[in-house]
Image: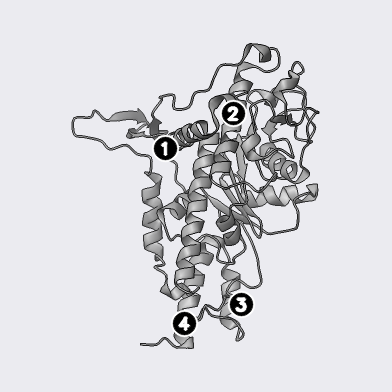
Amino acid sequence: STSTPSSQMLLAITYAARWMRYRRRLPLLVALMASSSYAFVSQHGCTSSLHEPRTTSNTYRLAHTTTSTANSEQLNTYPPIPPDLTQCFSSREWEQRCQLAVAYRIAYIHDWDECIFNHITLKVDGSDDDPDGPHFLLNDFGIGFDEITACNLLKVNLDGGIVDSLQPLPLERRDINSGKGRVFKPGYVLHSAIHAARHDVHAVWHGHDLDASAVSQTKVGILPLSQEATYVLNKGLSYHPFEGSANDLSEQPRLVANLGPTNQILMLEDHGPIVACPRIEEAFAGMYFLTRACKYQIKSLSAAGGDLTKIHMPNDSTVDEMVRRMVKFDEAPSTAKDKPTTQQSDDGKEEDVAEMHDTPGLMFAYARRTAERKFGKDTIYR
């Protein structure tokens, strides 16, 4: 049977109510129901104005904390610091530079770059106690993601100033830009705000993946249409309204407030995603699943002609179950002969501790090996 405009309106309002639960836009739903000029999603692919006027607020983290033991194996190792750099960097900073350099190469392989723009940053371990700390590493503006090396990364402070190495680098180590380096202000504004406010965050990954940026331009945001989308929801998803190029320091407090105290993913509306995590491996996994979810969403909506009523939209109980299962996403299987590990909870009770795979570490390790095969270790770690 052919659906009528009134039935489509009811379905559209139902979907709007479901997602406003996560976007905290219930006042908008009330305004929608009272409005006689709303635009419903039709079989002809008309766009929906269900979220007019555009309002954005935080969706704080859905994930529950779990007790787990992660596999302690070393999944990602890097070459030791070369002799000519031992007076320039600490061994730990060199390792972090290698981590970040290969992360840029990985992003290039996944098309998460845009010419010389976009940034991935990593807080330098131990820099919190420095007089102008903390410091973080980022790309030298003008150098492409496929040209990033451990040595041509810049170390900057929260004011955007370049922090000199302990000793000047050998000139051959900075063969593209032999000068002091350039800091792109929008990258500094976004990343320094998060590094300053969120002490749990060490890695911040921002890119302009085409599908993710396209979804950031829609009023429905990321929908739970896939396992990948559920991963994103479980890590905590927030939205930040577009204010123009991110080169105004006055935007920083609003950006940090919208990210929230625990969320790991922030969709910059009409711009693109930011993933902020304790480890670079987790930031990669977050960006991977986010971009994958957006690709599915773009394709499914295109296949349905933009009609949300033709999409398998899970109901609230299904979404709750999706999130519950995602909490155990990294859990390893157990067998009857396994001896369960227990520990004492805060209230003194014994509780089982599940063995967990380091899924982000495994994902990053595969991506790292791919980048090393494509570019060569000597090209990246120099």
Q: Measuring 80% from the left and 32% from the top, which residue is drawn there?
A: 161
SS category of the residue bearing label 3: helix
Q: Secondary structure at mark 4?
A: helix
Locate the N terminus and report the quarter of the image it occupies: bottom left
Q: Earlier in the sequence, mark 3 or mark 2?
A: 3
Amino acid type, residue under disc 1 in the picture: Thr
Which amino acid is tagged 4? Gln
Disc 4/disc 2 C-alpha distance (Å): 54 Å
Label 4 neighbourhood size at 10 Å, few (<14), some (14-19), many (20+)?
some
- Label 3 CA crowd tier, 10 Å (few <14, some 14–19, many 20+): some
Q: Write the residue at 55% across / 32% down.
A: 375
Mark 1 — residue? 359
Pair 2/1: label in front? 2
Viewer-side label of 1, 3: 1
User: Is 95 or 230 nearer to us in this picture?
Assistant: 95
Circle 3 is placed at which residue position? 31
- The numbered mark, 4 or 2, whose residue comes first in the sequence reads 4
Q: CA distance from mark 4 to mark 1?
A: 41 Å
Q: Please name the amino acid that badge 2 sits on.
A: Ile
